[in-house]
Every structure is written in C-alpha cells, then in structure tokens.
Amino acid sequence: MRLGILISGRGSNFEAIANSIARGKLDAEIAIVISNRANAPGLDIARERGIPMRVIASAGLEREAYDKLLIDELRTHEVDLVCLAGFMRLLSANVIRAFPNRVLNIHPSLLPAFAGLDSQRQALEYGVRITGCTVHFVDEFLDSGPIIIQSAVPVLDGDTVESLSARILVQEHLIYSKAIGYIVDGRITVEGRRVSIREED
Ligand code: GRF
C-alpha cells in the first residue's frame, strides 16, 4: 500500500510511521510526503531518509484550488492511503471523494472531546483525569469521522501542556502505525460511524 503523508510541522508521527515500515512492522511504502509549509522540520526527516517530498504552499490559496493541487500530486504518486500527520488544514469534500475511506488523521485527545487546536491545553484546563489520542477517518468536518483506535493517557497532578503532550505523543506514535496496519491488512469495516476490526487471521 502506498502512503501519502501530509504534514505542516515537526513530523514526529510521519517519522514513527517511517520507522514502523523500516522495522518491517508495517507493510507499506511512503510514496510522498507533502507539506503545506516550506519550513516544516518534518521535511528534513524526509530528506535525510531519501523519502520523496514536496512542498505545496497553501498560503493565499482557496481551499478548493489547494485541494486540487493536493489530489493531483497524490495521484501522480499513486497514493492508496492519505495520512494526515499534524497537517494544519481542513480538507474539502473533494479530497474525501477522491480517496473514500482512505484518509486518516491523528488527534491528541479522546474525540469527540477537545477537537480543534491545543487539545492538550483544553484537556488540562477542563480538568479531565484521562485524555489520550485518536486515529480516525477524515470527513469534511474538523476532527470528525469514524474512529479507528483510541489510546487513553492519564493526566497527572503537576502536568504541564508539555509533559502531557509528550505522554500522549508516545501513544500517538504507536496507534497511528497500528491503524494503518489494519487498513493495509483489509481488516476494517465501516458502518455509519462504527468501525469494526476483524481478528487477525
Ligand atoms: C500531533 O500531536 C498530532 O496528534 C496533531 O498534531 C501533532 C503533530 O505532531 N494532529 P508531529 O508533526 O507528528 O510531530
């Protein structure tokens, strides 16, 4: 399965996926990494590893115009599965239609709690004792779409946004590759909002 990974920043989830592939834990290939920001540190990771990458700058472009460039680039690289990994843009329905049930996202909270930006800060300020992360299919709404995997993470006394984010990130790196693996192995069925995962053969 050929992955297209979309980033805007650090790229640690992209790197974790690349590591899973390199270690033979995930049977996939990263066909292209696309960043909407030219200075995304994640691009250096792609460069160092010799993974094809491309900047498609989004500044000043209408959503539909941008998404057309995105779809063309993903098709050029024959991408089967699109993985958003810290990609800070909402996609239009065109992208979802071009890759039905083939666009994933990772979010640093237990959705539907704390959607949007700064989820770890939202969780701390709300005072929840448990938060976590979610891998879900993407639809045209923000942090919506059927949930594939969630991992719970405790909020500890004295946590800061940084300490909590770091604890969540460890889980993000585990569950993203796991969710991609389910898709690669054809184990997932989606009915409405509910995702079933078939037992391993
Ligand atoms: C992660 O916390 C992810 O859940 C969120 O954005 C952050 C991206 O981090 N969507 P990285 O660029 O993968 O390091």
Image (cartoon, rainbow, N blue to C red):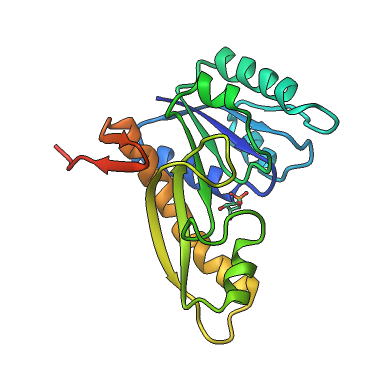
- Name, please, the residue furthest toward the left: 201
User: What residue is drawn where x is 74% and y is 20%?
Assistant: 65
**Image point 71% across, 23% down: which residue?**
64
Residue at the limit of the structure toward the right, as seen here: 60
Classify residue 179 as left or right of residue 14: left
- Where 129 sits versus 13, above or below? below
Q: Quadrant of the N terminus?
A: top left
**Residue at left 18%, top 41%?**
200
For the point 55% across and 47% down, the residue is: 143
- Image quarter where the C terminus lies is top left
The location of residue 148, given as percent across then percent down, is: 37, 45
Question: Is 17 positioned to the left or the right of 199 in the image?
Answer: right
Residue closest to the eye, 177 or 158: 158
The percent coordinates of residue 94 (x first, y second) are 59, 22
Q: Is residue 184 left or right of residue 104?
A: left
Front-most of 180 and 11? 180
Picture layout, residue 127 above or below residue 21: below
Q: Nearer the viewer, residue 9 or 60?
A: 60
Residue closest to the eye, 16 or 82: 82
Measured as percent of width and height from the top left, residue 151 is found at 39, 60
Snapshot quadrant of residue 124:
bottom right
Q: Position of residue 36 (x, y in %)?
A: 73, 34
| Labels in figure, total | 0
Residue 149 in the image: above or below residue 22: below
